[in-house]
Image (cartoon, rainbow, N blue to C red):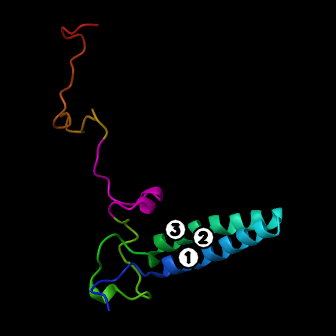
Amino acid sequence: MSQYDEGHTFAGWIGTAVATVGCSVLGAGICVTSASLLVGGFAVTVASVLVTWVLHLTGWGKPSGIRPRDQWGMRVRDLSAREGHPDCWGCRLAGRGRRTAEAPGVVRASGGAVPGREAAAVGAGGEA
């Protein structure tokens, strides 16, 4: 037995199963040269990505890194999914996750410029 959970999640297994079915239908479509099987297999494969993403966002996936031992089971939901996982591309696409970077040159409400950025004065002795 391993010393950490290896990412085995409900979202991962269901997504893999749906993708396997989609690729199998796609392969059958190639073998029998059927356009309807090709389109159907491609649609199921694309659906596997969406199914996995939705399950991840509803808490059946896992964040990056190692979880505590009591959260290793596949039937344990990830309660931090609602806020979004740090550095998770899927959570960012859904509008979740932490926001760490500010746009350059943003002026804060207090009137001060962002640290490390000097505001250029309009009309100050620079070349045009």
Measure the alpha-carbon separation of dots 3 and 1. 12 Å
Q: Secondary structure at mark 2?
A: helix
Residue with the mark numbered 1? 16
Mark 2 against mark 3, which lies toward the viewer?
A: 2
In screen coordinates, is 31 left or right of 127?
A: right
Q: Are the residues tagged 2 and 3 within 8 Å (C-beta)?
A: no
Q: Nearer the viewer, residue 88 or 43?
A: 43
Mark 1 against mark 2, which lies toward the viewer?
A: 1
Q: Secondary structure at mark 3?
A: helix
Q: Secondary structure at mark 1?
A: helix
Q: Nearer the viewer, residue 50 or 118?
A: 50
Within 10 Å of disc 3 (Cα), the crowding (few <14, some 14-19, many 20+) is many
Residue with the mark numbered 3? 53
Residue with the mark numbered 2? 48
What secondary structure characterizes most of the magenta part?
A: loop
Measure the alpha-carbon separation of dots 2 and 3. 8 Å
Is 74 placed above or below 104 here? below
Within 10 Å of disc 1 (Cα), the crowding (few <14, some 14-19, many 20+) is some
Within 10 Å of disc 2 (Cα), the crowding (few <14, some 14-19, many 20+) is many
Q: Which quarter of the image is occupied by the N terminus?
A: bottom left
Q: Residue at x 25, y 34 (%)?
A: 107
In screen coordinates, is 4 left or right of 10?
A: left
Q: Nearer the viewer, residue 41 or 93?
A: 41
Query: Which kind of residue does numbered mark 3 sit on?
Result: Trp
**Residue 31: assigned label:** none
Residue 44 in the image: state x and y as whole percent. Answer: 68, 69
Segment colored magenta? 86-102
